[in-house]
Amino acid sequence: MKNLLLFILLLLLWQCHPKETPVTKPHNNSKGPVILIHGGAGQIYEGRYTAEEEAQYHQSLQHALDSGYAWLSRGENAETVVEKVIRRLESDSLFNAGKGAVYTAEGKVELDASIMRGSDLNAGAVSGVQHIEHPISLAHWVMDSSKHVMLSGRGAEHFGFMMGLDSVSNEIFHTVQSESNYRRIMKEKYGTVGCVVLDNHGNLAAGTSTGGMMMKEFGRIGDSPIIGAGTYADNQGCAVSCTGHGEYFIRYAVAHHISQTVSNGVPIRDASSVIIHQTLKNAGGEGGVIAVDTAGNYTFQFNTQGMFRGVRNADTTYTLMYEE
Ligand code: ASP
């Protein structure tokens, strides 16, 4: 009897233990770190924004890239840098993530975020959170300190509070731009944010954070918090963050598809280009991706008029908004 109880106890403990994930050996990254970010894709075309607004977007993107690159150069690991860079963008009301996020049809802000580490395929995601200032940090907590991959709504928030995160009012996400500016930009606001990196240790990570689509039904979940749809990272393939019409990115499991295709030997640019410019476009899905592999190859692909984006590695750095 005693043995049976002991056996049941051991079985329960074993089931509660976080799942084992395969660990891939980091490869030597002699070329140095690479960081790519996006700030959303959509009808972003010359003439839509004032020169001052354009300058603000470039400055914000470049600042995030420079900080991320400095952290990577100091040897910080991929997922830590992804989280820190996305936190910065979540605090910037230019984007549709954290502060400045779009409203649901109910007039609330509901935030989604996810993060994934390419060395062991561990991942964390949260959806529909209303009272967490930095959803990307909550997703990182889910990845590191829970046995789950995805938590939603009140459960996600409850877990965050247990981890020591503060509860914030939903009002803090509401933008304080001038009324007319606000109305114009909020009419069709783009600005999901994403980051993919290759760190100094040869490991990849990806993360995405968003307020979702304008006027979404309350409770709607897009691709951004779905591992495999909006975010994916695998050292055997690549790290991917998506932005655009989430329903299509979910249907085509875009982020995983690109990584899988790269792991089969297809160059990252081709793998991303085919799904964005052919598969999604033919289906009517608009959006874009950023991706990087462990050799430091990277790509931006989008089938919309523009995408806020930028890159930094040992050889180059730039930020762009429109098609080039
Ligand atoms: N992909 C996001 C969503 O569907 C929105 C976006 O990237 O603009 O929630």
Image: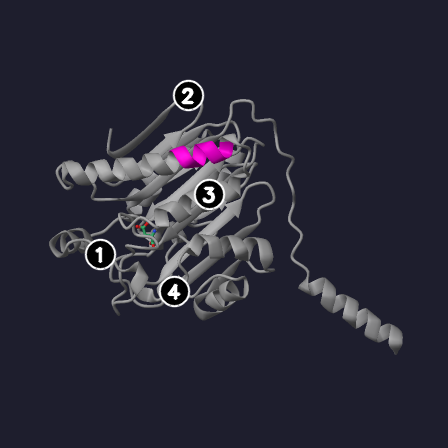
Q: How many marks?
A: 4
Q: Position of residue 80 (x, y in %)?
A: 51, 44
Label 1 residue SS: loop
Magenta span of residues: 66-72
Mark 2 Cα-neighbour bin, 10 Å: few <14, some 14–19, many ≥20: few
Mark 1 Cα-neighbour bin, 10 Å: few <14, some 14–19, many ≥20: few
- Gap between marks 2 and 3, in whole Å? 20 Å
Q: Position of residue 244 (x, y in %)?
A: 31, 48
Mark 1 against mark 2, which lies toward the viewer? 1
Mark 4 Cα-neighbour bin, 10 Å: few <14, some 14–19, many ≥20: few
For the question of whether residue 302 can be seen, the reply is no
Disc assigned to residue 197: none
At label 3, the amino acid type is: Val
At label 2, the amino acid type is: Asp
- What colour scheme governs how the chains and residues are painted in the rendered image of this protein? one colour
Residue at 16% x, 41% y is 49
- Marks 3/1 in contact by CB < 8 Å: the verdict is no
Residue at 57% x, 32% y is 202
- Gap between marks 1 and 2, in whole Å? 38 Å
Disc assigned to residue 82: 3
Name the residue beneath numbered marker 1: 176
At label 1, the amino acid type is: Val
Disc assigned to residue 168: 4
For the question of whether residue 216 can be seen, the reply is yes
